[in-house]
Image (spheres, rainbow, N blue to C red):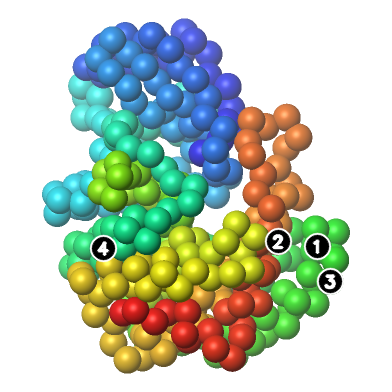
Amino acid sequence: MAVYTAVDPDDLAALVARYDIGTVLSCKGIAEGVENSNFLLETTAGRFILTLYEKRVREDDLPFFVDLLGHLAARGCPVPAMIKDRAGTAIQQISGRAACIIQFLSGISLTHPSAGQCAAAGTALGAMHRALADYDGSRENSMGHRHWRGIAEATGNLDAVLPGLQAIVEDELAFLDAHWPADLPAHVIHADLFPDNVLMLGEHVTGLIDFYFAATDFRAYDVAVTHASWTFSDDGRDCDPALAGALMRGYASEVTLNDAEFAALPLLARGAALRFLLTRAHDWVHTPADALVTRKDPSPFLNRLRRYQAADAASLFAGA
């Protein structure tokens, strides 16, 4: 979440007037994240999230996200509804951007999850995958394996981000191109289930949010993304075996990966680490200086990549 585009108060009042959600009391920008402009909207009826879609989220994809969240909600997954106005419309326009008003979910996004919270996140991920196994919607993964080279090229000189990064990325891209699997079980996945995209109260998951990278890809890749984001130290150098084991056991309580998926996890995790290394490097270079947004240091994902490249990387996924 972030703020790139300002909202005129009169335009906001006119937008809210189309809904049965009261009248505007306040609207405050939210600085976390990097993808869209997000605001905490308070009305006489309660709290909501106003999202204006920027950068990588295409307006043509928004009906897919509305349908996806509706499917998950119907299956009992704790996801935020995109609220429809009195005419039945969820996707709006404001400040020259496509926009949605979204249900506010209670809970806290974590910075340093406990083993119990990792287990709960793994269970929620597995339950989401079970709910998506028969979902007939699809979307190309615009941040998937086939697009990583393009992200690297669009960033420019990677050595200006981190010394020596250009050669590291070129070598890893060549390795992943040669070894990326082709036939693992796949369906729509979240693809970005970082701790800040999971809301919790204690060890209870109250919300899975920010589905704007959701796309059709390997379910085991989604596990690898979640492993990379939940189980490492802040600097990305150390994977905590207690956290990793809890995450994997939580997932296994809902979904059993087959042998090929489990064997592929270290490779898929290398891909996940490279994906976030590249997108963070790209945003480090290209985020506007005046944007209300917190840029994220790419170096912790370079450290994760190195850890997943190690000969004992398979041991990081023990516990399933």
Q: Marks 3/4: CA distance?
A: 38 Å
Circle 3 residues within 10 Å: few <14, some 14–19, many ≥20: few
**Quarter-wise, where is residue 164 in the image?**
bottom right
Amino acid carrying mark 1 in the image: Leu
Residue 181 on image: x %, y %: 46, 87
Q: Residue at x 19, y 47 (%)?
A: 73
x and y, in percent, of residue 290 in the image: 73, 30
Q: CA distance from mark 2 to mark 4?
A: 29 Å
Which of marks 4 and 2 precedes in the sequence?
Answer: 4
Q: Which residue is mark 3?
A: 164
User: Residue 23: x percent and y percent?
Assistant: 31, 9
**The C terminus appears in which quarter of the rendering?**
bottom left
> Pointer 2: what residue?
299
Q: Where is mark 1, residue-wise?
A: 162
Q: Earlier in the sequence, mark 2 or mark 3?
A: 3
SS at badge 4: helix
Q: Is residue 185 above or below residue 136?
A: below
Q: Which tag, 3 or 4, sits closer to the chain's start? A: 4
Residue displayed at 14% across by 54% down: 75
Q: Secondary structure at mark 1?
A: loop
Q: Quadrant of residue 206?
A: top left
Q: Which residue is mark 4?
A: 123
* Mark 2–mark 1 CB contact (< 8 Å): yes
**Upstream in the sequence, badge 2 or badge 1?**
1
Task: Determine the secondary structure under disc 3.
Answer: loop
For disc 1, the neighbor class at 10 Å (few under 14, some 14 to 19, many from 20) is few
